[in-house]
Image (spheres, grey):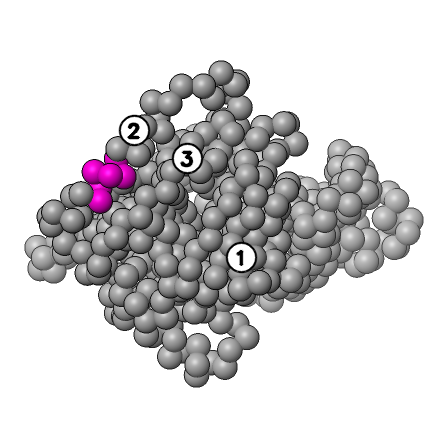
Protein backbone atom coordinates (compact mmCIF):
# COMPACT_ATOMS: atom_id res chain seq x y z
CA UNK A 1 0.00 0.00 0.00
CA UNK A 2 1.12 3.50 -0.78
CA UNK A 3 0.30 6.27 1.64
CA UNK A 4 0.94 9.98 1.53
CA UNK A 5 0.66 11.77 4.83
CA UNK A 6 0.17 15.56 4.85
CA UNK A 7 2.74 15.91 2.09
CA UNK A 8 3.88 19.46 1.35
CA UNK A 9 6.50 20.92 -0.93
CA UNK A 10 7.69 24.52 -0.75
CA UNK A 11 10.45 25.63 -3.09
CA UNK A 12 13.37 27.82 -2.07
CA UNK A 13 11.71 30.87 -3.63
CA UNK A 14 8.69 30.44 -1.36
CA UNK A 15 6.36 28.93 -3.98
CA UNK A 16 4.06 26.41 -2.35
CA UNK A 17 3.86 23.62 -4.93
CA UNK A 18 1.97 21.13 -2.79
CA UNK A 19 0.05 21.59 0.40
CA UNK A 20 -1.16 18.86 2.74
CA UNK A 21 -1.66 15.98 0.34
CA UNK A 22 -3.05 12.96 2.14
CA UNK A 23 -4.18 9.90 0.24
CA UNK A 24 -3.67 6.15 0.07
CA UNK A 25 -3.46 3.83 -2.90
CA UNK A 26 -4.51 0.20 -2.37
CA UNK A 27 -2.74 -2.84 -3.83
CA UNK A 28 -3.22 -3.13 -7.59
CA UNK A 29 -5.14 0.12 -7.71
CA UNK A 30 -4.75 2.61 -10.54
CA UNK A 31 -5.29 6.21 -9.51
CA UNK A 32 -5.22 9.27 -11.73
CA UNK A 33 -4.10 12.74 -10.68
CA UNK A 34 -5.92 15.18 -12.90
CA UNK A 35 -5.84 18.94 -13.10
CA UNK A 36 -4.64 21.90 -15.13
CA UNK A 37 -1.14 23.26 -15.44
CA UNK A 38 0.50 24.32 -12.21
CA UNK A 39 -1.58 22.23 -9.82
CA UNK A 40 1.48 20.36 -8.64
CA UNK A 41 0.73 16.95 -10.10
CA UNK A 42 4.18 16.54 -11.67
CA UNK A 43 5.80 17.76 -8.45
CA UNK A 44 3.83 15.13 -6.56
CA UNK A 45 5.00 12.43 -8.95
CA UNK A 46 8.64 13.51 -8.56
CA UNK A 47 8.29 13.21 -4.79
CA UNK A 48 6.83 9.71 -5.22
CA UNK A 49 9.76 8.79 -7.48
CA UNK A 50 12.23 10.02 -4.87
CA UNK A 51 13.67 12.55 -7.32
CA UNK A 52 12.68 15.43 -5.02
CA UNK A 53 12.35 15.65 -1.25
CA UNK A 54 9.18 16.80 0.51
CA UNK A 55 9.32 19.86 2.76
CA UNK A 56 6.87 18.35 5.24
CA UNK A 57 4.97 15.11 5.60
CA UNK A 58 6.01 11.76 4.21
CA UNK A 59 5.46 8.96 1.73
CA UNK A 60 5.54 5.30 2.66
CA UNK A 61 5.40 2.31 0.32
CA UNK A 62 4.42 -0.83 2.28
CA UNK A 63 5.63 0.93 5.39
CA UNK A 64 9.00 1.94 3.95
CA UNK A 65 9.55 5.71 3.70
CA UNK A 66 10.43 7.02 0.23
CA UNK A 67 13.00 9.81 0.19
CA UNK A 68 15.15 8.70 -2.73
CA UNK A 69 14.68 6.50 -5.83
CA UNK A 70 13.52 3.06 -4.73
CA UNK A 71 13.93 -0.29 -6.54
CA UNK A 72 10.21 -1.03 -6.23
CA UNK A 73 9.17 2.22 -7.91
CA UNK A 74 9.19 2.53 -11.69
CA UNK A 75 8.49 5.65 -13.72
CA UNK A 76 7.55 6.52 -17.27
CA UNK A 77 8.25 10.16 -18.08
CA UNK A 78 6.41 12.51 -20.37
CA UNK A 79 9.14 11.92 -22.99
CA UNK A 80 10.48 8.40 -23.66
CA UNK A 81 13.96 9.34 -22.34
CA UNK A 82 15.56 6.33 -24.02
CA UNK A 83 19.34 6.22 -24.06
CA UNK A 84 20.14 6.81 -27.72
CA UNK A 85 23.40 4.80 -27.64
CA UNK A 86 21.63 1.62 -26.53
CA UNK A 87 19.50 -0.63 -28.71
CA UNK A 88 15.83 -1.11 -27.91
CA UNK A 89 16.55 -4.34 -26.02
CA UNK A 90 19.42 -2.76 -24.07
CA UNK A 91 17.18 0.15 -23.13
CA UNK A 92 14.47 -2.17 -21.84
CA UNK A 93 17.08 -4.06 -19.84
CA UNK A 94 18.75 -0.95 -18.41
CA UNK A 95 17.47 -1.64 -14.89
CA UNK A 96 18.37 -5.35 -15.02
CA UNK A 97 22.15 -4.98 -14.73
CA UNK A 98 22.18 -6.98 -11.48
CA UNK A 99 20.23 -9.94 -12.90
CA UNK A 100 21.71 -12.95 -14.65
CA UNK A 101 21.92 -12.45 -18.38
CA UNK A 102 19.59 -15.37 -19.07
CA UNK A 103 16.92 -13.93 -16.79
CA UNK A 104 17.38 -10.43 -18.22
CA UNK A 105 17.14 -11.75 -21.75
CA UNK A 106 13.90 -13.58 -21.01
CA UNK A 107 12.31 -10.60 -19.29
CA UNK A 108 13.34 -8.21 -22.06
CA UNK A 109 11.96 -10.48 -24.78
CA UNK A 110 8.70 -10.92 -22.89
CA UNK A 111 8.24 -7.19 -22.21
CA UNK A 112 9.00 -6.30 -25.82
CA UNK A 113 6.50 -8.84 -27.02
CA UNK A 114 3.86 -7.41 -24.67
CA UNK A 115 4.30 -3.93 -26.16
CA UNK A 116 4.33 -5.34 -29.69
CA UNK A 117 7.96 -4.57 -30.48
CA UNK A 118 9.42 -8.08 -30.48
CA UNK A 119 10.90 -7.55 -33.93
CA UNK A 120 12.59 -4.28 -33.00
CA UNK A 121 14.95 -5.49 -30.27
CA UNK A 122 18.12 -4.68 -32.22
CA UNK A 123 17.00 -1.26 -33.50
CA UNK A 124 18.31 2.10 -32.33
CA UNK A 125 15.80 4.42 -30.62
CA UNK A 126 16.19 6.93 -33.47
CA UNK A 127 14.68 4.36 -35.85
CA UNK A 128 11.39 4.20 -33.92
CA UNK A 129 8.34 6.46 -34.04
CA UNK A 130 7.35 8.50 -30.99
CA UNK A 131 4.67 6.00 -29.98
CA UNK A 132 7.05 3.07 -30.36
CA UNK A 133 9.68 4.86 -28.27
CA UNK A 134 7.13 5.42 -25.50
CA UNK A 135 6.24 1.71 -25.65
CA UNK A 136 9.91 0.89 -25.09
CA UNK A 137 9.90 3.25 -22.10
CA UNK A 138 6.83 1.46 -20.71
CA UNK A 139 8.52 -1.92 -21.19
CA UNK A 140 11.63 -0.56 -19.44
CA UNK A 141 9.54 0.47 -16.43
CA UNK A 142 7.63 -2.83 -16.20
CA UNK A 143 10.58 -5.17 -16.74
CA UNK A 144 11.85 -4.73 -13.18
CA UNK A 145 8.36 -5.60 -11.84
CA UNK A 146 7.90 -2.51 -9.66
CA UNK A 147 5.32 -2.48 -6.88
CA UNK A 148 4.47 1.11 -7.74
CA UNK A 149 4.47 2.51 -11.26
CA UNK A 150 4.42 6.26 -11.86
CA UNK A 151 3.23 7.66 -15.18
CA UNK A 152 3.88 11.35 -15.87
CA UNK A 153 1.55 12.22 -18.75
CA UNK A 154 3.30 9.56 -20.84
CA UNK A 155 0.78 9.73 -23.67
CA UNK A 156 0.28 13.48 -23.93
CA UNK A 157 2.55 13.93 -26.95
CA UNK A 158 0.83 11.22 -29.00
CA UNK A 159 -2.14 11.29 -31.35
CA UNK A 160 -5.49 9.83 -30.23
CA UNK A 161 -5.13 6.52 -32.11
CA UNK A 162 -1.63 5.84 -30.80
CA UNK A 163 -2.76 6.84 -27.33
CA UNK A 164 -5.63 4.34 -27.30
CA UNK A 165 -3.37 1.50 -28.43
CA UNK A 166 -0.80 2.44 -25.80
CA UNK A 167 -3.50 2.25 -23.14
CA UNK A 168 -4.09 -1.35 -24.24
CA UNK A 169 -0.35 -2.18 -24.09
CA UNK A 170 -0.14 -0.60 -20.66
CA UNK A 171 -3.12 -2.52 -19.27
CA UNK A 172 -1.79 -5.73 -20.82
CA UNK A 173 1.49 -5.37 -18.93
CA UNK A 174 -0.28 -4.18 -15.79
CA UNK A 175 -2.51 -7.26 -15.72
CA UNK A 176 0.54 -9.52 -15.35
CA UNK A 177 2.04 -8.13 -12.14
CA UNK A 178 -0.79 -5.76 -11.12
CA UNK A 179 1.35 -3.00 -9.53
CA UNK A 180 -0.14 0.13 -8.01
CA UNK A 181 -0.20 2.89 -10.61
CA UNK A 182 -0.25 6.65 -10.16
CA UNK A 183 -1.07 8.30 -13.47
CA UNK A 184 -0.69 12.04 -13.97
CA UNK A 185 -2.84 13.31 -16.81
CA UNK A 186 -4.79 16.31 -18.01
CA UNK A 187 -7.01 14.14 -20.18
CA UNK A 188 -10.36 13.17 -18.64
CA UNK A 189 -10.86 10.39 -21.19
CA UNK A 190 -7.51 8.90 -20.30
CA UNK A 191 -8.28 8.92 -16.59
CA UNK A 192 -11.62 7.22 -17.26
CA UNK A 193 -10.00 4.65 -19.54
CA UNK A 194 -7.33 3.60 -17.06
CA UNK A 195 -8.04 4.58 -13.46
CA UNK A 196 -10.08 3.14 -10.60
CA UNK A 197 -10.14 6.49 -8.80
CA UNK A 198 -9.28 10.01 -9.85
CA UNK A 199 -8.06 12.87 -7.69
CA UNK A 200 -8.87 16.30 -9.03
CA UNK A 201 -6.09 18.74 -8.17
CA UNK A 202 -6.11 22.49 -7.92
CA UNK A 203 -3.31 25.04 -8.07
CA UNK A 204 -1.95 27.74 -5.74
CA UNK A 205 -1.13 25.97 -3.60
CA UNK A 206 -1.29 22.57 -5.27
CA UNK A 207 -3.80 20.42 -3.40
CA UNK A 208 -6.42 17.74 -3.82
CA UNK A 209 -9.84 19.26 -4.42
CA UNK A 210 -11.98 16.21 -5.02
CA UNK A 211 -11.89 12.46 -5.22
CA UNK A 212 -13.95 10.73 -7.92
CA UNK A 213 -14.38 6.93 -7.77
CA UNK A 214 -14.93 5.75 -11.33
CA UNK A 215 -16.34 2.31 -10.52
CA UNK A 216 -15.72 0.80 -13.94
CA UNK A 217 -14.91 -2.85 -14.62
CA UNK A 218 -12.19 -3.88 -17.08
CA UNK A 219 -12.05 -4.19 -20.03
CA UNK A 220 -13.75 -0.86 -20.59
CA UNK A 221 -15.98 0.03 -23.48
CA UNK A 222 -15.54 3.68 -24.36
CA UNK A 223 -19.00 3.93 -25.83
CA UNK A 224 -20.80 2.33 -22.86
CA UNK A 225 -23.17 4.32 -20.66
CA UNK A 226 -21.15 3.58 -17.54
CA UNK A 227 -18.01 4.96 -19.19
CA UNK A 228 -19.80 8.09 -20.34
CA UNK A 229 -21.30 8.56 -16.91
CA UNK A 230 -17.88 8.25 -15.23
CA UNK A 231 -16.39 10.73 -17.68
CA UNK A 232 -19.25 13.14 -17.04
CA UNK A 233 -18.81 12.96 -13.27
CA UNK A 234 -15.08 13.59 -13.66
CA UNK A 235 -15.69 16.55 -15.96
CA UNK A 236 -18.25 18.01 -13.55
CA UNK A 237 -15.78 17.80 -10.70
CA UNK A 238 -13.05 19.37 -12.81
CA UNK A 239 -15.38 22.21 -13.82
CA UNK A 240 -16.32 22.90 -10.21
CA UNK A 241 -12.68 23.01 -9.32
CA UNK A 242 -11.84 25.41 -12.14
CA UNK A 243 -14.76 27.73 -11.42
CA UNK A 244 -14.10 28.06 -7.69
CA UNK A 245 -12.94 31.61 -6.92
CA UNK A 246 -10.18 32.58 -4.37
CA UNK A 247 -6.70 31.13 -4.84
CA UNK A 248 -5.98 33.06 -8.04
CA UNK A 249 -5.26 36.05 -5.81
CA UNK A 250 -1.71 34.77 -5.27
CA UNK A 251 1.00 35.69 -7.74
CA UNK A 252 0.25 34.39 -11.18
CA UNK A 253 3.83 34.07 -12.32
CA UNK A 254 5.03 31.71 -9.61
CA UNK A 255 3.22 28.77 -11.11
CA UNK A 256 5.14 28.78 -14.35
CA UNK A 257 8.44 28.61 -12.54
CA UNK A 258 8.07 25.25 -10.94
CA UNK A 259 5.64 23.42 -13.12
CA UNK B 1 39.93 16.39 -65.93
CA UNK B 2 37.39 15.89 -68.66
CA UNK B 3 37.88 12.15 -68.42
CA UNK B 4 37.05 12.14 -64.73
CA UNK B 5 33.93 14.16 -65.38
CA UNK B 6 32.91 12.01 -68.31
CA UNK B 7 33.42 8.88 -66.24
CA UNK B 8 31.23 10.33 -63.55
CA UNK B 9 28.52 11.13 -66.08
CA UNK B 10 28.82 7.73 -67.72
CA UNK B 11 28.68 5.98 -64.36
CA UNK B 12 25.60 7.84 -63.25
CA UNK B 13 23.86 7.50 -66.58
CA UNK B 14 24.71 3.82 -66.86
CA UNK B 15 23.77 2.91 -63.31
CA UNK B 16 20.50 4.77 -62.98
CA UNK B 17 18.19 3.03 -65.45
CA UNK B 18 19.72 -0.42 -64.98
CA UNK B 19 19.48 -0.51 -61.19
CA UNK B 20 16.01 1.08 -60.93
CA UNK B 21 17.05 2.63 -57.61
CA UNK B 22 14.69 2.39 -54.63
CA UNK B 23 13.20 5.61 -53.29
CA UNK B 24 15.68 6.14 -50.50
CA UNK B 25 18.61 6.11 -52.89
CA UNK B 26 17.22 8.76 -55.16
CA UNK B 27 19.76 11.36 -54.06
CA UNK B 28 22.79 9.17 -54.72
CA UNK B 29 23.23 9.59 -58.52
CA UNK B 30 23.20 13.38 -58.21
CA UNK B 31 25.84 13.26 -55.53
CA UNK B 32 27.98 10.85 -57.52
CA UNK B 33 27.63 13.14 -60.50
CA UNK B 34 28.48 16.28 -58.58
CA UNK B 35 31.44 15.39 -56.40
CA UNK B 36 34.11 15.74 -59.13
CA UNK B 37 32.99 19.31 -59.73
CA UNK B 38 35.23 20.41 -56.87
CA UNK B 39 38.22 19.15 -58.84
CA UNK B 40 37.54 21.39 -61.82
CA UNK B 41 39.12 24.57 -60.46
CA UNK B 42 42.39 23.13 -59.08
CA UNK B 43 42.86 20.93 -62.16
CA UNK B 44 42.26 23.88 -64.50
CA UNK B 45 44.79 25.97 -62.59
CA UNK B 46 47.32 23.13 -62.61
CA UNK B 47 46.90 22.45 -66.32
CA UNK B 48 47.06 26.18 -67.08
CA UNK B 49 50.29 26.60 -65.15
CA UNK B 50 51.76 23.49 -66.74
CA UNK B 51 50.94 24.87 -70.17
CA UNK B 52 52.25 28.34 -69.34
CA UNK B 53 55.64 26.95 -68.28
CA UNK B 54 55.99 24.51 -71.14
CA UNK B 55 55.07 27.23 -73.64
CA UNK B 56 57.79 29.44 -72.13
CA UNK B 57 55.36 32.09 -70.86
CA UNK B 58 56.73 31.63 -67.33
CA UNK B 59 59.97 30.22 -66.02
CA UNK B 60 58.47 28.17 -63.21
CA UNK B 61 61.60 28.67 -61.14
CA UNK B 62 59.79 29.81 -57.96
CA UNK B 63 56.52 28.07 -58.73
CA UNK B 64 57.39 24.81 -60.45
CA UNK B 65 54.75 23.24 -62.74
CA UNK B 66 52.79 20.21 -61.41
CA UNK B 67 54.82 17.76 -63.48
CA UNK B 68 58.05 18.80 -61.79
CA UNK B 69 56.50 18.65 -58.31
CA UNK B 70 55.15 15.17 -58.96
CA UNK B 71 58.51 14.09 -60.36
CA UNK B 72 60.26 15.32 -57.20
CA UNK B 73 57.68 13.53 -55.03
CA UNK B 74 58.20 10.39 -57.05
CA UNK B 75 61.97 10.60 -56.81
CA UNK B 76 61.79 11.11 -53.03
CA UNK B 77 59.47 8.13 -52.72
CA UNK B 78 61.58 5.93 -55.00
CA UNK B 79 64.78 6.64 -53.07
CA UNK B 80 63.00 5.79 -49.80
CA UNK B 81 63.84 9.23 -48.40
CA UNK B 82 60.18 10.27 -48.34
CA UNK B 83 59.19 7.31 -46.16
CA UNK B 84 61.87 8.14 -43.58
CA UNK B 85 60.44 11.64 -43.30
CA UNK B 86 56.81 10.48 -43.26
CA UNK B 87 57.64 7.92 -40.60
CA UNK B 88 59.43 10.49 -38.41
CA UNK B 89 56.57 12.99 -38.67
CA UNK B 90 53.88 10.36 -38.23
CA UNK B 91 55.58 8.94 -35.15
CA UNK B 92 55.89 12.37 -33.52
CA UNK B 93 52.24 13.20 -34.18
CA UNK B 94 51.08 9.79 -32.95
CA UNK B 95 52.97 9.97 -29.66
CA UNK B 96 52.14 13.65 -29.05
CA UNK B 97 48.51 13.06 -29.96
CA UNK B 98 48.29 10.02 -27.68
CA UNK B 99 49.72 11.88 -24.70
CA UNK B 100 47.77 15.09 -25.26
CA UNK B 101 44.47 13.32 -25.94
CA UNK B 102 44.81 11.04 -22.90
CA UNK B 103 45.52 14.00 -20.62
CA UNK B 104 42.70 16.00 -22.21
CA UNK B 105 40.17 13.19 -21.74
CA UNK B 106 41.11 12.54 -18.10
CA UNK B 107 41.14 16.20 -17.05
CA UNK B 108 38.09 16.97 -19.19
CA UNK B 109 36.05 14.20 -17.52
CA UNK B 110 37.16 15.32 -14.05
CA UNK B 111 36.39 18.98 -14.71
CA UNK B 112 33.07 18.17 -16.32
CA UNK B 113 31.87 15.78 -13.63
CA UNK B 114 33.16 17.54 -10.51
CA UNK B 115 32.37 21.20 -9.83
CA UNK B 116 35.20 21.26 -7.30
CA UNK B 117 37.83 20.15 -9.81
CA UNK B 118 36.37 22.58 -12.35
CA UNK B 119 36.56 25.57 -9.98
CA UNK B 120 40.01 24.54 -8.88
CA UNK B 121 41.69 23.69 -12.16
CA UNK B 122 39.78 25.22 -15.04
CA UNK B 123 40.87 28.86 -14.53
CA UNK B 124 44.54 27.82 -14.58
CA UNK B 125 44.09 25.73 -17.71
CA UNK B 126 42.17 28.53 -19.42
CA UNK B 127 45.00 30.93 -18.58
CA UNK B 128 47.56 28.50 -20.03
CA UNK B 129 45.39 28.11 -23.11
CA UNK B 130 45.66 31.84 -23.76
CA UNK B 131 49.41 31.45 -24.33
CA UNK B 132 50.22 30.84 -28.02
CA UNK B 133 51.59 27.31 -27.94
CA UNK B 134 54.60 28.18 -30.11
CA UNK B 135 55.73 30.44 -27.27
CA UNK B 136 56.57 27.30 -25.30
CA UNK B 137 59.21 26.25 -27.82
CA UNK B 138 62.27 27.91 -26.22
CA UNK B 139 61.30 26.64 -22.78
CA UNK B 140 60.65 23.12 -24.04
CA UNK B 141 64.04 23.07 -25.75
CA UNK B 142 65.69 24.12 -22.51
CA UNK B 143 63.76 21.52 -20.55
CA UNK B 144 63.63 18.57 -22.90
CA UNK B 145 66.57 19.18 -25.23
CA UNK B 146 66.60 19.71 -28.96
CA UNK B 147 65.58 16.15 -29.90
CA UNK B 148 62.31 14.21 -29.82
CA UNK B 149 61.02 14.98 -26.32
CA UNK B 150 60.57 18.72 -26.87
CA UNK B 151 58.80 18.14 -30.19
CA UNK B 152 56.43 15.58 -28.75
CA UNK B 153 55.73 17.86 -25.79
CA UNK B 154 54.80 20.75 -28.07
CA UNK B 155 52.44 18.57 -30.11
CA UNK B 156 50.89 17.17 -26.93
CA UNK B 157 50.20 20.69 -25.64
CA UNK B 158 48.55 21.57 -28.94
CA UNK B 159 46.34 18.46 -28.88
CA UNK B 160 45.49 18.74 -25.19
CA UNK B 161 43.39 21.91 -25.20
CA UNK B 162 40.75 21.12 -27.84
CA UNK B 163 40.28 17.64 -26.37
CA UNK B 164 40.03 18.97 -22.81
CA UNK B 165 37.53 21.66 -23.78
CA UNK B 166 35.47 19.30 -25.94
CA UNK B 167 35.15 16.61 -23.29
CA UNK B 168 34.42 19.05 -20.47
CA UNK B 169 31.83 20.92 -22.53
CA UNK B 170 30.28 17.63 -23.63
CA UNK B 171 29.84 16.42 -20.07
CA UNK B 172 28.42 19.77 -18.94
CA UNK B 173 25.83 19.63 -21.71
CA UNK B 174 24.61 16.06 -21.12
CA UNK B 175 20.80 16.12 -21.01
CA UNK B 176 19.61 16.44 -17.39
CA UNK B 177 16.68 14.19 -18.29
CA UNK B 178 18.97 11.30 -19.17
CA UNK B 179 20.95 11.79 -15.97
CA UNK B 180 17.62 11.55 -14.15
CA UNK B 181 16.99 8.17 -15.77
CA UNK B 182 20.27 7.08 -14.17
CA UNK B 183 19.02 8.36 -10.80
CA UNK B 184 15.73 6.48 -11.14
CA UNK B 185 17.72 3.27 -11.65
CA UNK B 186 19.89 4.21 -8.64
CA UNK B 187 23.25 4.23 -10.44
CA UNK B 188 26.29 4.96 -8.28
CA UNK B 189 28.45 7.91 -9.41
CA UNK B 190 30.99 5.65 -11.19
CA UNK B 191 28.15 3.71 -12.85
CA UNK B 192 26.51 6.99 -13.86
CA UNK B 193 29.77 8.11 -15.47
CA UNK B 194 30.25 4.78 -17.24
CA UNK B 195 26.66 4.10 -18.34
CA UNK B 196 25.33 7.62 -19.02
CA UNK B 197 27.91 10.43 -19.07
CA UNK B 198 30.66 8.77 -21.08
CA UNK B 199 28.47 7.34 -23.85
CA UNK B 200 26.60 10.64 -24.05
CA UNK B 201 29.80 12.61 -24.75
CA UNK B 202 31.20 10.20 -27.36
CA UNK B 203 30.13 12.40 -30.32
CA UNK B 204 31.78 15.47 -28.74
CA UNK B 205 34.83 13.36 -27.93
CA UNK B 206 35.20 12.27 -31.55
CA UNK B 207 34.90 15.87 -32.77
CA UNK B 208 37.40 17.01 -30.13
CA UNK B 209 39.87 14.27 -31.10
CA UNK B 210 39.60 15.23 -34.76
CA UNK B 211 40.30 18.90 -34.14
CA UNK B 212 43.09 17.86 -31.76
CA UNK B 213 44.64 15.73 -34.48
CA UNK B 214 44.44 18.65 -36.91
CA UNK B 215 46.27 20.87 -34.42
CA UNK B 216 48.78 18.07 -33.86
CA UNK B 217 49.75 18.30 -37.53
CA UNK B 218 50.00 22.07 -37.28
CA UNK B 219 52.36 21.82 -34.35
CA UNK B 220 54.51 19.06 -35.80
CA UNK B 221 55.53 21.51 -38.53
CA UNK B 222 56.47 24.10 -35.92
CA UNK B 223 58.31 21.44 -33.93
CA UNK B 224 60.27 20.27 -36.95
CA UNK B 225 61.14 23.86 -37.90
CA UNK B 226 62.95 24.21 -34.59
CA UNK B 227 65.67 21.87 -35.69
CA UNK B 228 65.21 18.37 -37.02
CA UNK B 229 67.26 16.11 -39.23
CA UNK B 230 64.25 14.25 -40.56
CA UNK B 231 60.53 14.71 -40.91
CA UNK B 232 58.35 16.44 -43.47
CA UNK B 233 58.91 19.76 -41.68
CA UNK B 234 62.65 19.27 -42.12
CA UNK B 235 62.01 18.67 -45.83
CA UNK B 236 60.27 22.06 -45.97
CA UNK B 237 63.12 23.91 -44.27
CA UNK B 238 65.68 22.05 -46.35
CA UNK B 239 63.86 23.00 -49.55
CA UNK B 240 63.85 26.64 -48.52
CA UNK B 241 67.55 26.71 -47.65
CA UNK B 242 68.59 24.96 -50.84
CA UNK B 243 66.15 26.95 -52.97
CA UNK B 244 64.12 23.94 -54.09
CA UNK B 245 60.48 25.04 -54.29
CA UNK B 246 59.53 21.71 -55.88
CA UNK B 247 60.71 19.92 -52.72
CA UNK B 248 58.73 22.31 -50.52
CA UNK B 249 55.57 21.71 -52.52
CA UNK B 250 56.17 17.96 -52.56
CA UNK B 251 56.45 18.03 -48.75
CA UNK B 252 53.23 20.09 -48.52
CA UNK B 253 51.40 17.52 -50.63
CA UNK B 254 52.77 14.73 -48.45
CA UNK B 255 51.57 16.62 -45.37
CA UNK B 256 48.09 16.99 -46.84
CA UNK B 257 47.88 13.29 -47.70
CA UNK B 258 49.24 12.18 -44.33
CA UNK B 259 46.85 14.46 -42.43
CA UNK B 260 43.87 13.31 -44.42
CA UNK B 261 44.87 9.67 -43.96
CA UNK B 262 45.27 10.08 -40.20
CA UNK B 263 41.87 11.78 -39.95
CA UNK B 264 40.22 9.04 -42.02
CA UNK B 265 41.74 6.37 -39.78
CA UNK B 266 40.47 8.21 -36.69
CA UNK B 267 36.98 8.51 -38.17
CA UNK B 268 36.97 4.83 -39.17
CA UNK B 269 38.10 3.75 -35.69
CA UNK B 270 35.57 5.89 -33.84
CA UNK B 271 32.70 5.36 -36.30
CA UNK B 272 31.21 2.33 -34.53
CA UNK B 273 31.06 4.31 -31.26
CA UNK B 274 28.73 6.97 -32.64
CA UNK B 275 26.61 4.92 -35.03
CA UNK B 276 23.56 5.49 -32.82
CA UNK B 277 23.63 9.25 -33.35
CA UNK B 278 20.49 10.80 -34.76
CA UNK B 279 22.16 13.41 -36.94
CA UNK B 280 23.37 13.93 -40.46
CA UNK B 281 26.24 11.59 -41.02
CA UNK B 282 29.52 13.45 -40.96
CA UNK B 283 30.94 13.10 -44.44
CA UNK B 284 34.69 13.02 -43.78
For numbered disc 3, what is the local secondary structure? strand
| Contact, mark 1 vs mark 3 (Cβ under 8 Å) | no
**Along the line of sight, which residue is nearer the eye, B20 or A139?**
A139
Q: Is residue A17 left or right of residue A189?
A: right
Segment tinted magenta in the rendering: A230-235
Q: What's the CA distance linking mark 1 and mark 3?
A: 29 Å
Instruction: Single out the mark in the foreground, 1 or 3.
Output: 3
Task: Confirm whether residue A76 shows in the render.
Answer: no
Residue B234 on the magenta span:
no
Tell me which residue sits at (51%, 54%) in the image. A3
Say whether marks 2 and 1 touch (CB < 8 Å): no
Q: Helix or strand or loop: what does disc 2 sit on?
A: helix
Mark 2 → mark 1, Cα distance in angstroms: 35 Å
| A191 or A100: nearer the viewer | A191
Label 1, on which residue? B184
Question: Do pointers 2 and 1 mark residues of a single chain?
Answer: no
Could you say where residue A55 lies in the image, as x and y percent from the top left?
Answer: 64, 41
Foreground pick, B62 / A91:
A91
- Residue B29: which disc? none
* Residue B153 image offset from top left, x and y in percent: 78, 53
Residue A112 picture location, percent across and down:
31, 68
**Which residue does the image show at 73% across and 44% down from the upper left?**
B115
Which tag is nearer the camera, tag 2 or tag 1? 2
* Labelled disc at residue A239: 2
Q: Give the chain letter at badge 3.
A: A
Q: Helix, strand or loop at disc 1?
A: helix
Magenta-drawn stretch, dominant element (helix, strand or loop): helix
Give residue A209's mark.
3
Amino acid sequence: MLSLDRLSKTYADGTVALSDITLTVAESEIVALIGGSGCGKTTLLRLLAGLDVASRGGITLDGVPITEPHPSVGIVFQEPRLLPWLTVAQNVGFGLADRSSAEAKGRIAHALEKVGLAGHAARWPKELSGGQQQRVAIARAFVTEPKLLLLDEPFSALDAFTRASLHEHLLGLWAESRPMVVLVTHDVGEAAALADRAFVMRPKPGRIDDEVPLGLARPRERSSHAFEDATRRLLASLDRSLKAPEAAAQDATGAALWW
Amino acid sequence: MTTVLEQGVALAAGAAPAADPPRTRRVAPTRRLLWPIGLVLPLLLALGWEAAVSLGLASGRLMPPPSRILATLWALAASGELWTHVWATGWRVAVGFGLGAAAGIVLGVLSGASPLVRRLGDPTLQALRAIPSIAWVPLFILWFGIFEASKVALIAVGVFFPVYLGVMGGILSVDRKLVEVGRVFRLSPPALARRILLPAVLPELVTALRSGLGLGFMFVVAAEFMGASEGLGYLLVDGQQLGKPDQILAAIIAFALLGKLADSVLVALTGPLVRWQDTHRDRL
